[in-house]
Image (tube, rainbow, N blue to C red):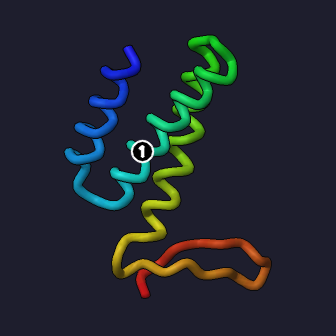
Amino acid sequence: MKKFLLVASVILTLAACTQTERGATIGAVSGGIIGGAISNDVRGAAVGAAVGGVAGALIGRANEPGYCVYRDRYGRRYTARC
């Protein structure tokens, strides 16, 4: 099963086109593996995959060319075209 997950994560990462998609894929796979290993439960793996996918997508989106991370006057971060 572990070999299957490793191969699936490599294939999904290579199939992703943009940095956002790659980040979401890597985050979801990593989060699922870590969540499952920590909790020994399917629910833990699902929560880890969801959280990792969202975090990976946000990080990937911030790394796309043409986008910069800014802060507004309230200290909140947002991305916009440079």
Is 28 left or right of 35, judged from the image as shown? left
Q: Quadrant of residue 35?
A: top right
Residue at the spot 59% in from the left edge and 39% down from the top edge: 51
Q: Nearer the viewer, residue 70 or 21?
A: 21
Q: Quadrant of residue 48?
A: top right
Q: Which of 4 and 69 is in front in this view?
A: 4
Say above or below: 76 vs 4: below
Say above or below: 63 vs 7: below
Say above or below: 63 vs 73: above
Q: Quadrant of the N terminus?
A: top left
> Of the residues shown, which amino acid type is indicated by label 1?
Ile
Q: Where is residue 52 in the image (x, y as percent from the top left)?
A: 55, 41
Outermost residue on the bottom side: it is: 82
Q: Position of residue 4 (x, y in %)?
A: 31, 21
Is 5 left or right of 79, judged from the image as shown? left
Q: Position of residue 75 (x, y in %)?
A: 77, 77
Residue at the spot 56% in from the left edge and 50% down from the top edge: 55
Name the residue beneath numbered marker 1.
Answer: 26
Q: Where is residue 49 in the image (x, y as percent from the top left)?
A: 52, 32
Q: In which quarter of the image is the C terminus?
A: bottom left
